[in-house]
Image (cartoon, grey):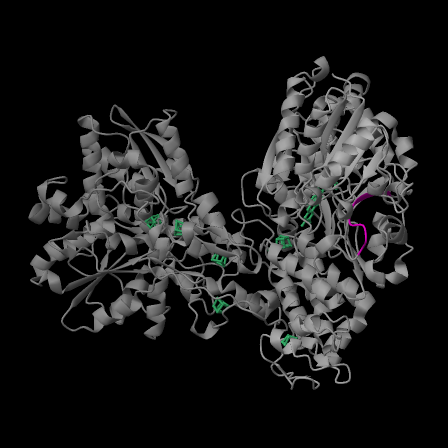
Amino acid sequence: MGKVNITIDGIDMKVPEDYSVLEAAREVGVDIPTLCYLKDINEIGACRMCLVEIKQARGLQASCVYPVSEGLDIITNSESIRKARKATLELILSNHDRSCLTCNRNNSCELQALSDRLNVRELRYEGEKTLYPLDLKSHSIVRDNNKCILCRRCISMCKNIQTVSVIDTTERGFYSNISSPFDLSLNDVPCISCGQCINVCPVNALREKDDTELVWDAINDKSKHVVVQTAPATRVAIGEEFGLPIGTRCTKNMVGALRRIGFDKVFDTDTGADLTIMEEGTELLHRLNNGGKLPMITSCSPGWVTFCEYNFPEFLDNLSTCKSPMQMFGAVLKTYYAKKTNINPADIIVVAVMPCIAKKAESKRPEMSVNGLADVDHVITTRELAKMIKEAGIDFHTISSDHYDDPMGDASGAGVIFGATGGVMEAAIRTVYEIVTKKPLDNLDIISVRGIKGIKEANVQIGDFTLKAAVASGTGNARKLLEMVKSGEKDYHFIEIMACPGGCVNGGGQPIQSSAVRSKYDLREERAKAIYAEDVKLSVRKSHENKLVQKLYKEFLGEPGGHKSHELLHTHYIDREKYPISQ
Amino acid sequence: MHIYSSHVLVCSGTTCSSKQSILIIDKLKDGIKRKKLNEKIQVITTSCFGLCTKGPIVVIYPEGAIYSNVTLNDIDEIINEHLVNGRIVKRLLSGDNNENNSYETADFFKKQERIALRNCGVINPEMIEEYIAYDGYQALGKVLTDMTPEQVIDKVLDSGLRGRGGAGFPTGRKWLFAAKAKGDKKYVCCNADEGDPGAFMDRSILEGDPHSIIEAMAIAAYGIGSDQGYIYVRAEYPIAVKRLNIAIKQAKDMGLLGDNIFETDFSFNLELRLGAGAFVCGEETALMTSIEGKRGEPRPRPPFPANKGLFQKPTILNNVETLANIPVIILKGANWFKTIGTKKSPGTKVFAIGGKINNTGLVEIPMGTTLREVIYDIGGGIPNGKKFKAAQTGGPSGGCIPASHLDVPIEYDTLIELGSMMGSGGLIIMDEDNCMVDIAKFFLEFSVDESCGKCPPCRIGTKRMYEILKRITEGKGEVGDIKTLEELSETIQAAALCGLGKSSPNPVLSTLRYFRHEYEEHIINKRCSAGVCKELLDYIIIPSDCKGCTKCIKVCPTKAITGMIKEPHIINQEECIKCGACLEACPFGAIIRK
Ligand SMILES: Cc1cc2nc3c(=O)[nH]c(=O)nc-3n(C[C@H](O)[C@H](O)[C@H](O)COP(=O)(O)O)c2cc1C
Ligand code: SF4
Ligand code: SF4
Ligand code: SF4
Ligand code: SF4
Ligand code: SF4
Ligand code: SF4
Ligand code: FES
């Protein structure tokens, strides 16, 4: 990469030639304000907060999209810049529902922070305000256009990264707004509830549907036995909500806090993940040995499953019939655990803490139940759990607990790595290898499937068989991969797909970081590091060696892939029309 | 090609066809056939002559007689007198004295110089043969056989031609940048989106001389090394679209478009893209985004289109009128071109004159012509003996020029100095009955409606300015409003993403500059002396003039007028909604507006 010489506020510097002025400025400690900019995702120069003067160009220029070039002379702080930024921000605020006190993003809002930073203390330009109805219909996601500042990060995410394209700008000028085709609710369009749009929204225009009150109600209902399960990715992210560095492992604090909140039992979804590996590994071997449909594709990411149902119905038979770990574990809790503890399953409330908002919708699918009882009753996100902890007055930093509860608290490192892209593949390989070869795997770290690359491939030698595997995260990458499989360009036995870029560590229910933080750190990488650190620390790192899982098959399920498993742990999929005429 | 001895040209432009010019064409054709003259005389449907107020217009060559206000009843006389007996029908001539009859000498045309409009109204735009007969495609032939691409660009550079789409960027420089840019594919685009309110210059060229655009684009493509062009034309111009399609097909059939033009290894293909009518799609990056099939919104520059334009490839975009100049420049040379117009702005500019002026229509004048010449010599002055107040150029991006600057020569830079701009050529004349606050509000409302909504300064800022202007014209203005307008203008100019937003405060700023007192009058005295802002007016009956005829009582929709018959009436100001019906109805002029 070539370098160019530029001057910023009189400081001469050399920067890579593909830098924007904004990136260059940040290197010399000039923190230019931004609102619409999101590194690599949304670089459209729309919000005009990042204006600077450039000697070689007329007027003010948006630094986030201005490429550096040799000799560029830039000023980032002048009277006219300051005035233009502040007035523009005041204009944005003049058409904003400024209800910070009761806002879900109070204290984590980029608009609010910027108003403070630019010292906006009065609004000079009041006038008409647009008024939009809230979209409350979806199980997972709420849209409040009265808070939207039209930065369009959500569109770039949904359209360019996820290739789902269910939101776009409509109307013009003052009345332009973000909406879905035909003005439909997000519930009635092929939105996959990945929640990636929420994570990039700088304000509270998009948020998860808040289910914390339902959980409090359940806890307060003395007739109910309320158990909670926590997904692997939650433990490496929740600390961010309490000011801890990105990628801090907080399993102990989280378990302690959950118990203090008042859950009767605190279990680990990782146990469900181990179960998934037993079932899915068995299914893979069965398909390989009996000429079944290949490649087999994982089904533990509900965002991905929905994406497949809408966009690639021809691959539905390729999807593993396994339910997701959360659902499998819920089903086991309401059957095996209920029997074991002698509690009426109807009195058990299963709450799941997930990095994900698609899980909210997943838990509501009619297939996800046994004997008329939903496998999982309530799903809350990592963010919602953090709010509950704060509301309960628990000091997250000091509370701690060493272990999940008996009798369902055992999990392996293989379950933990489900939280990062490639984790399911790695966990499956650890188990399938040993089942097939009956020999212990020398090196448990399958590096080739790790990392944040969108599409990864690996050839894994299992005895004399070479397993051709691929891993994709982000539905845009999934689309690319499946198109290659469809055209015959690529050919695999086993594919892992996660809807969220980087996998669940970067799920739509995880703590939201500002654009500035996201420019500095790759959340996917930092959180995944913590996941792999957690794995190494565990004594059991293979699903089939999980004592609890072994016991579960012996006492209750019989064989992986057996009759009982099929009844409780497997499901089916639906070919969904994107925009049915009947709507 | 058949040779006719006479040609009868009938305008089918917007105004003329609304006054039955199509029927006139039919009747002429019929009559000529009945006289068995159809082998000798050809009736040609043309586009706008630019004399819209006097339409329908019929021009007969070789005499060059211009008949105006022609009706169906005049046709027999024209045929019998002029076409059969060779006697000009003087009473139908358009000149102010009836001697002034030919195209070259009519007052309206005297100060004009027709380069871009050279063929409009002269040739049949649906026949490539006629374009060729008027030197069409000669320039392309010359370029392809005698000139290198560098020479083409040099010539355009040398001519000093500046973009007629508004900004006045030197066309040759634009072409040079694109020629130098590296790219496996390059594009030539024509901006035929013409969205300014009241503008129809480009439309007239497209309808009247479509081949000139095609030829110019091919020349541009040769110059920059492109083989693909797009004409982005608004869908509301169905005749232009139709004639462009015909022209493209004809050019293809004759080997003037497509592969290996003039048996050289130069190939150029051309396609139309229809714009849905959003004004912002005329902005160059928005236009390209729209051609790419996305929502037509501007994108930041750099990268400039010359490097990364349409589909991220080097692209040039030129306005219709700019392009119409190209073939002439190639044939007659840069030096010839520079003899017309001014040093900094060579050539001519087409304006659509409208508003309070006797001759509305299209004019093409050499740059440097003064506003006074345009208004009084070409435009025939202000109707009804009213006083000229201001001229608005540049549409919603431009500003108002007051009477004190009537003698300023019209060219790019002078207009900008005056706080206006050339724009694409809308020229609206205003007299003492126009309220300048109201005018500013009108143009700003246009920008508010046309803002794409991408950036907040324009999306919200123009809206806020409009709200303030609306308040002022409703008598609810406050001290401080002017300051806020100026502040907002400054913000929007500095911070908006594209030209639409950046220039949208111009109508407000220029009226504030020259007519500040009108704002102050509205805000402080709550009065509109032009009598435009309804809420600031009172309708009053002058008792001494009122005969008590009760006519006003009968027309008043709100029963605001009371009075006994034969006694002076009185208007109750609380009830009056200022509709003006009574003023019209009063036979004695006893009602005034104040
Ligand atoms: C809001 C906006 C609307 C525009 N509309 C037009 C238009 O309708 N026709 C046009 O030729 N140029 C229009 N322009 C100017 C174009 O962006 C561009 O400068 C021009 O087409 C370049 O051609 P030229 O160099 O030949 O003038 C518009 C610019 C803006 C900012
Ligand atoms: S979105 Fe931000 S600025 Fe708006 S109300 Fe919520 S916290 Fe306040
Ligand atoms: S949740 Fe995912 S699919 Fe749905 S709108 Fe947001 S980004 Fe698009
Ligand atoms: S919903 Fe959020 S991310 Fe989307 S445009 Fe509005 S403010 Fe930006
Ligand atoms: S990748 Fe994880 S967080 Fe994202 S939708 Fe799938 S399960 Fe949910
Ligand atoms: S200035 Fe107006 S038209 Fe231009 S990008 Fe901004 S909002 Fe759109
Ligand atoms: S202006 Fe209209 S409403 Fe007022 S008095 Fe006259 S007729 Fe009646
Ligand atoms: S325009 Fe640069 S951050 Fe929005």
Where are the magenta residues, as a range? B357-366
Above or below, B412 relative to A2:
below
Q: Residue at x 68, y 52 (%)?
A: B197
Q: Give the side of residue B170 with respect to residue B311, left or right.
A: right
Question: Can residue B211 be spotted in the picture?
Answer: no
Splitting the image into 4 quarters, where does residue B93 fall?
A: top right
Residue at the limit of the structure toward the top, as seen here = B263
Q: Is residue A256 above or below residue B128?
A: below
Splitting the image into 4 quarters, where does residue A440 fall? Answer: top left
> Considering only vertical position in the picture, is B176 above or below A343?
above
Q: Is residue B213 magenta?
A: no
> Which is more toward the observer, A373 or A9?
A373
Name the quadrant containing residue A553. top left
In percent of width and height, residue A79 lies at 74, 65
> Where residue B265 sits in the image (x, y, percent)?
69, 15
Residue A77 picture location, percent across and down: 71, 62
The image quadrant in which ligand 6 is located: bottom right
Relative depth, front residue between A527 and B120: B120
Q: Position of residue B538 (x, y in %)?
A: 70, 79
Which sits in the foreground, B418 or A51? B418
The structure residue drawn at horizontal position 28% and vertical position 31%, both measured from the top left corner, is A295
Asked if the stretch drawn in magenta spans residue B358, the answer is: yes
Q: Is residue A73 left or right of residue A130?
A: right
Q: Quadrant of the N terminus of chain B?
A: top right
Q: How many marks?
A: 0
- The quarter of the image holding the C terminus of chain B is bottom right
Q: Is residue A214 visible?
A: yes
Main SS of residues in magenta:
strand
Q: In front here: B94 or B134?
A: B94
